[in-house]
Amino acid sequence: MSAEEKSLNFIEQIIEDDLKNGLSSDKLRFRFPPEPNGYLHIGHASAICLNFGLGIDYKAPVNLRFDDTNPSKEEQEFVDAIKKDVEWLGFNWDKECYASDYFQQLYDWAVELIKKDKAYIDSQSSEDMAIQKGTPTSPGTDSPFRTRSIEENLDLFTRMKNGEFEKGTHVLRAKISMKANNMLMRDPIIYRIMHAHHHRTGNDWCIYPMYDWAHGESDYLEQISHSFCTLEFLPHRELYDWFLNQIYDETKVRPKQREFARRNLSHTVVSKRKLLQLVEEKYVTAWDDPRMSTISGMRRRGITATAIRNFANTIGIAKRTNLIDVSLLDFCIREDLNKIAPRVMAVLNPIKLVITNYPEGKEEWLTAENNPEEEVMTFREVPFSKELYIEREDFQEEAHKKFFRLTLGTEVRLKNAYIIKGESVVKDAEGNITEIHCTYDFDSKSGSGTEASNRKVKGVIHWVSIPHAVEAEVRLYDRLFTHENPDGNKEVDFKEYINPESLKVITGYVEPSLQTAEELDHFQFQRLGYFCVDKDASAEKLVFNKTVGLRDTWAKVSEQ
């Protein structure tokens, strides 16, 4: 890659500068380092696209490394889900790595720190350590255990490893400076005692490294050239470098940590802790609930990997955190689905329509195009009969002049079929319309080439033949939160903004071509939106999720 080929973002500029300053291009290696303590979300998708995108652009390998240093919150389920998400997004990693691969080496290096009098065992309570750490404007004070002898520290650390002590009784701290301006440099904890079963190492370890210790050293062991993190890790960079200084061999690549800003998405939360809260407190059904900002939830909703990658590329990389309107993601979703989703007919709020002059018992199969965006047009056959379902809102008994759908005495075209004219209605005892009666122009069949078929009418509506209609459960999803930044106000519980209308489950009717649709098949229900088949669907019961509408209705709501 060169600056002449395209405009570089600041991350690419860092790489280009390093290459100009002597870093060999064959030494480039990137990584994506998720913690297996939950499912990946849209924020992770941006980081995945960044790191793997750099790998593609620079023809450099990218590692998938799991930061599995906290067994109390980590599970194999999350490892498997993360791998599935990265693959689904279209990326391939070079090496599958785990921080736990390096537990012995990390321990050995920690022993070396103790021997160099650069680490010590602290036996204070966590509350006392917090007090003696000071504040951002006042220095900390030394731990009373800071002057322990190297021999005593080595003995205690060995016994910690051997499981002789209870959780919380001792920690290993780096001996840096309790007066450092950066509070992360005030003798940070390197190891803590945890008697917890690890999903990979079992019960082999009773102590586990802290993220700051494992992160940079793992990068070094894997010879990662550039370690890109989100902006909250900027204060950690000084510690990242201090730890590397203790082990760095000048003959090897020294990893460089650099930071980019999170691109938060409106009307969502991306905190794993808050996402877990939504699951555990039953506000959603699971991590892959289609209302969740998780990649698995978005996939289940029908959002494509291409749409997510395009979204990540569109918002780009920045140095400042900002809030991206979810309507931009919706645009990317529509843009992709418009190209690939077959057009089909479904009626979600049905009312019966009877064509009184259509022959009793007659059945026709009409030709309908699948997707006008296709390079080579394909078609399917759709059944037509005397009795149809249309959308209730497509009929008004008495309508204003700008209502171009079906009314009494006016004509509309049934999509791919005939021109019909509203004649009368049937009502129940409460005055509700239960049937619409109309007549059809038998010579107006779409595509027949007759003069009547070329006649222009102002409205076109969709329909489903009642004898052939397939009943389906349709889940209408909306934004999970009514507020654009639900966790922006720390004094208000983010759950206060949960949208009570985020899910409506209705029964709809679809054309019979969808009877064989499979999980994650995408469709445009004409005039209604984009939908996909949910994993709950079966041969006996179709289930569709609404992915996104055909246009942004929230923009109108927010303007009111």
Image (cartoon, grey):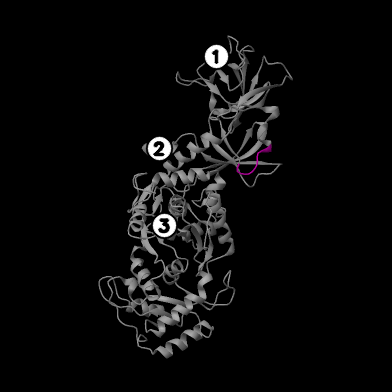
* x and y, in percent, of residue 292 in the image: 51, 51
Query: What residue span does the magenta drawing correspond to?
Result: 516-520
Mark 3 crowdedness (10 Å alpha carbons): few <14, some 14-19, many ≥20: some
Q: Secondary structure at mark 2?
A: helix
Q: Which mark is residue 25?
A: 3
Q: Which amino acid type is shown beneath numbered disc 1?
A: Gly
Q: Which residue is mark 2?
A: 555
Residue labelled with disc 1: 409
Q: CA distance from mark 1 to mark 3?
A: 74 Å
Q: Nearer the viewer, residue 5 or 467?
A: 5
Query: Disc 3 marks which amino acid?
Result: Ser
Q: Position of residue 71 (x, y in %)?
A: 53, 70
Say which element carries label 1. loop
Indicate yes or no whether the magenta region holds residue 517: yes
Q: Secondary structure at mark 3?
A: helix
Q: Nearer the viewer, residue 524 or 468?
A: 524
Residue at horizontal 42%, vertical 90%?
151
Query: At which x and y percent is residue 86?
Result: 53, 53
